[in-house]
Image: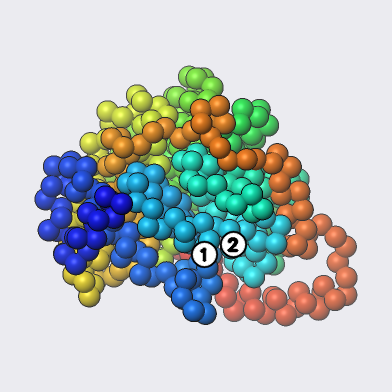
């Protein structure tokens, strides 16, 4: 209540009027700033209005700017917001949205989003459910799927043999349905979500199977060259069946998602191998994506080719790096001051839009770049929340340290059937596939461009 009152008083003010004390690390000012940015972000959400669809931002293209996954990412950001500020303003909409989108088999594979359903899309919703379990977000009613069980369902569908094949020696494909553009691409973010979720499920439950899959995924990434074992650069992906030509674009969230997963593995095992991997990824990430102490999305921002998806990545990195400092304290000395510098730069350019405080994407310029949206707000909110994590956050809980979310190790057992990959193909299927193919080809360039620049 106190937090809501504080930022409600400031909501009509330009953001820079609140920022002076935030730059001096005042907890109250940072919370007020986070509240304003969160409120502005939620103005892009229409799912709670008459005729809207709960849980998703307007889209997918051409019906709106946003793909399905970005809604799941936004609820994860707001779970962190609640955990770090105590503000419950959005808890009802978070609960309603994450339950509405679970899909017919309670595994975050709703059939009406099949045409753009990637392993990474499903993975982001699964990671938000995992975060809800780790942060002790209020549990759903007993007749609804529980947070831990939802995370397990996503993991289990992705661990199913139907998602894995011998092409490129293993690894998850980007897309789940065979008809989707990008099915013939194996990429780091799809495997990163799976690795990250496996590492966190292992820490939460102690089930060795999750750790085994995390290890297997890391090894595959190194063996194929998507993780450079000498530099620790993480490249975007490669085309099947051989994956010999690596797409060398680097995105901050690929680094962040593997670094956070490695940190959870170290925290759970105390194995120095995982500590070393975490530290090397973090050192590379700070050098590469914070070249002057302020986050830059190097593969698109410097050439003005960022897509709507990419506007979110820097915020994820801030949030995930702040958790890494809890899991692997040796990283804090390098991480904390850079996240602070970057967050302050992010906030200072939030001077645009009709309210005079909306955020752009080019933080290092110090000037609003003329483009705002849910992704830009989400990124700056993530940066601001990273400043509360070191002072306000308790480490993510486990089943043995206060976690209350109920799990189901067998969740997701039906989840690969609705996409038509596990039964014989009929004549009706073939006819339907022809129609779907026409639709998919029409949308292909827009969907594929969301992750691959210059391919």
CB contact under 8 Å: marks 1 and 2 = yes
Residue 368 visible (yes or no): no
Where residue 349 sits, quadrant-wise, is: bottom left
Question: Which residue is at 57% across, 51% downward?
Answer: 140
Q: Is residue 5 left or right of residue 376?
A: left
Where residue 389 sits, quadrant-wise, is: top left
**Circle 1 residues within 10 Å: few <14, some 14–19, many ≥20:** many
Q: Nearer the viewer, residue 404 or 29?
A: 404
Where residue 454 sits, quadrant-wise, is: bottom left
**Circle 2 residues within 10 Å: few <14, some 14–19, many ≥20:** many
Q: Does dot 2 land on a helix, a strand or a loop?
A: loop
Q: Which residue is mark 2?
A: 101
Residue 281 percent coordinates (x, y): 41, 35
| Coloring scheme used | rainbow
Q: Is residue 27 left or right of residue 408?
A: left
Residue 400 percent coordinates (x, y): 55, 27
Q: Which residue is mark 1?
A: 55
Question: Which residue is at 64% across, 45% downward?
Answer: 149
Q: CA distance from mark 1 to mark 2?
A: 6 Å
Residue 252 percent coordinates (x, y): 39, 48
Residue 377 image label: none
Q: Nearer the viewer, residue 366 or 225?
A: 366
């Amino acid at each position: 209540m106190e937090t809501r009152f504080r930022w409600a008083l400031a909501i009509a003010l330009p953001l820079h009027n609140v920022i002076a004390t935030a730059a001096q690390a005042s907890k109250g000012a940072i919370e007020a700033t986070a509240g304003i940015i969160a409120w502005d972000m939620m103005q892009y959400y229409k799912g709670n209005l008459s005729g809207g669809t709960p849980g998703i931002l307007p889209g997918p293209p051409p019906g709106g700017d946003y793909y399905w996954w970005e809604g799941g990412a936004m609820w994860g950001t707001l779970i962190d917001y609640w955990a770090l500020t105590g503000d419950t303003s959005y808890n009802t909409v978070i609960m309603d949205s994450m339950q509405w989108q679970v899909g017919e088999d309670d595994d975050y594979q709703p059939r009406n989003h099949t045409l753009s359903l990637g392993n990474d899309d499903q993975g982001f919703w699964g990671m938000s459910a995992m975060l809800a379990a780790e942060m002790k977000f209020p549990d759903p009613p007993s007749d609804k799927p529980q947070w831990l069980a939802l995370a397990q369902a996503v993991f289990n569908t992705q661990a199913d043999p139907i998602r894995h094949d011998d092409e490129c020696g293993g690894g998850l494909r980007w897309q789940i349905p065979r008809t989707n553009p990008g099915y013939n691409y194996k990429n780091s973010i799809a495997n990163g979500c799976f690795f990250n979720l496996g590492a966190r499920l292992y820490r939460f439950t102690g089930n060795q199977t999750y750790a085994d899959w995390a290890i297997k995924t890391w090894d595959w990434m190194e063996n194929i060259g998507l993780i450079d074992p000498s530099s620790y650069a993480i490249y975007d992906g490669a085309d099947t069946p051989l994956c010999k030509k690596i797409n060398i674009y680097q995105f901050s969230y690929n680094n962040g998602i593997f670094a956070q997963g490695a940190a959870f593995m170290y925290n759970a095992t105390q194995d120095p191998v995982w500590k070393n991997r975490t530290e090397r990824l973090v050192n590379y990430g700070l050098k590469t994506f914070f070249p002057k102490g302020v986050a830059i999305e190097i593969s698109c921002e410097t050439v003005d080719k960022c897509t709507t998806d990419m506007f979110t990545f820097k915020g994820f990195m801030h949030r995930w790096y702040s958790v890494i400092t809890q899991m692997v304290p040796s990283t804090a000395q390098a991480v904390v001051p850079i996240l602070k510098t970057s967050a302050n730069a992010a906030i200072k350019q939030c001077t645009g839009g009709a309210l005079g405080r909306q955020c752009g994407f080019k933080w290092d310029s110090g000037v609003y770049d003329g483009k705002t949206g849910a992704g830009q707000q989400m990124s700056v909110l993530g940066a601001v929340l990273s400043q509360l994590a070191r002072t306000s956050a308790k480490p993510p809980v486990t089943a043995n340290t206060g976690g209350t979310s109920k799990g189901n190790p067998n969740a997701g057992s039906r989840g690969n059937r609705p996409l038509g990959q596990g039964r014989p193909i009929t004549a009706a299927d073939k006819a339907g596939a022809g129609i779907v193919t026409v639709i998919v080809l029409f949308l292909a360039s827009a969907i594929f461009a969301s992750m691959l620049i210059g391919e």
